[in-house]
Image: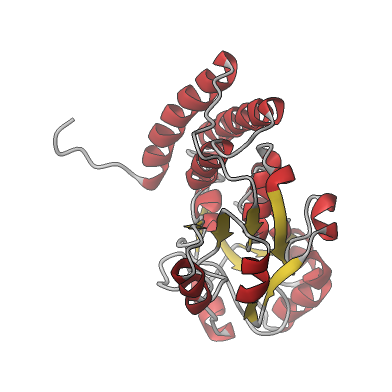
Amino acid sequence: MSGARFTTGQRLVCVMAVTLRLVTGLAAAGVVLVQAGTPQRIVSLSPHATELLFSVGAGDQVVAVSESCDYPEAVRRLPKVSGYRGTNVEAVIALKPDLVVAWPGGNRAADLAALRRLGVRVYESELDTLTGILAEVRRFSEWATDDESRRHAMRQAGDATAQILSLQRRYGTSRRVRVFYQLGAGRLFTLSDRHAVGEALAVCGAENVFGRLQLPAPEVSSEAVLAAKPEAVLVADPASLVAVREQWTSARLFDTRSADVRVLAVDGARLHRPTLRTFAAVQALCESIDRVRHTLR
């Protein structure tokens, strides 16, 4: 409709609906998307890219990864050519890859530029939306040689799309819950709506109290959190749950009794790494938020 304005939730429903028709149609038809020049030797410099490559059936082509790649188990045996100090360009070149999958947010731009100058094809994977994960599954599937794994990944993508649409329908019109998403104990780092977690919170019928901040992972103050008056604190690091509960009872955001039900641990490891496993974590996130919702008046 000309001039119509859509909310974030409405836009998500539209995009997801289109995505569902596409991925389920391709999976049902058994469509093979492999293109000419399919890469045979892939270096993956990002944990999320590595996991997605294995998910779609391109794992056998991965010849090296970064130090932070830990899933699936097979990647632990692969050479490590990148870490927090940067990428070992010489080691990558020695492996003679025909594709490097990089993460602009985690890999040094100078290293990626050096690889390109040396004639290496570099694909940059930066995912900040749930729909972006599904698009990347389709894109990576073009590089796979395992037909059954590819079809399985496409079916998973279709299931994930249907799951998000179902969650949106269930919680999209529920009472909004104001939440502070806390990465861990100590300094107060959170995630804004520039991160996929912001989209996940919206799906669950939650309002991210720092969603409008410009940085994806800003640091905030205790005073800012208290002023925002969140109704729940979601702790991305479950090991920090006890410390965070003590933190907010001491700051009098919650009393001891309410902290037990309003300060909850969530699966940050899967929420922060954009892969097909993220969608199960979104389901659990929604269920946790809904438990808080039922305690509110």
Question: From the viewer's perspective, is 201 left or right of 88?
Answer: left
Question: From the viewer's perspective, is 94 left or right of 115?
Answer: right
Residue that lies at the very extreme toward the top in this rendered image: 29
Q: Residue at x 47, y 63 (%)?
A: 119
Q: How many marks?
A: 0
Q: Nearer the viewer, residue 194 or 68?
A: 68
Q: Nearer the viewer, residue 85 or 92?
A: 92
* Placement of 88 over or under 195, stated as above or below: below
x and y, in percent, of residue 253 in the image: 64, 75
Q: Residue at x 79, y 50 (%)?
A: 72
* Res 140 quadrant in image: top right
* Placement of 152 over or under 89, stated as above or below: above
* Residue 280 visible in the snapshot: no
Q: Nearer the viewer, residue 222 or 276?
A: 276
Residue that lies at the very extreme toward the left in this rendered image: 2
* Residue 47 visible in the snapshot: yes
x and y, in percent, of residue 193 in the image: 46, 61
Rendered image coloring scheme: secondary structure
Image quadrant containing the N terminus: top left
* Placement of 96 over or under 23, stated as above or below: below
Q: Residue at x 56, y 66 (%)?
A: 230
x and y, in percent, of residue 269 in the image: 72, 59
x and y, in percent, of residue 105 in the image: 52, 69
Q: Residue at x 71, y 84 (%)?
A: 186
